[in-house]
Image: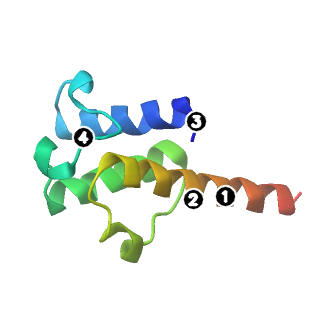
Amino acid sequence: MSDELVQRVLKVIATSKRIPPETVTIDSEFLQLGIDSMDAVEILFALENEFDITIPDDEVRSVRNVRQMCEGVEKLVAAKSAETKAGQ
């Protein structure tokens, strides 16, 4: 996964949670960061806006850490770009 994508996800999480960006890493667990289910919803909306994607609710429930979130966003961004190319 691209470094740029990871950095954008980390920034969204830090901004949404109002925590210093340096405290969020790819290996951070949500519990460590104090992210509860309400925070997660807020972060998801922010990620949808940041990447112009739609994150299905059922995929969200299994995400417990930043790496899983990055992987999910990467998949959705790739699928969206494949759709865009197919539609051209």
Three-letter residue code for mark 1: Lys
Contact (CB < 8 A) between labels 1 and 3? Answer: no
Task: Compare marks 1 and 3 and give the one earlier in the sequence.
Answer: 3
**Circle 2 sits in a helix, a strand or a loop, which is it?**
helix
Q: How many marks?
A: 4
Q: In which quarter of the image is the C terminus?
A: bottom right
Residue 37, numbered circle: none
Identify the residue at horizontal 16%, vertical 30% (top origin). Answer: 19
Mark 3: which amino acid? Ser
Q: How crowded is mark 2: few (under 14 residues within 10 Å), some or many (20 or more)?
A: some
Can you identify the residue that label 2 sits on? 76
Image height of 26 relative to 79, above or below = above
Of label 1 and label 4, which has the lower sequence position?
4
In the image, 2: left or right of 43? right
Q: Distance between the residues labelled 4 and 2?
A: 20 Å
Mark 1 in CB contact with mark 2 (< 8 angstroms): yes
Q: Distance between the residues labelled 3 and 4?
A: 21 Å
* Label drawn at residue 16: 4
Q: Name the residue under label 1.
A: 80
Q: Which residue lies furthest to the front in this view?
A: 27
Residue plotted at (44% across, 48% down) = 70
Residue 28 position, x and y percent, is: 25, 41
What residue is at 19 percent from the left and 24 percent from the top?
A: 20
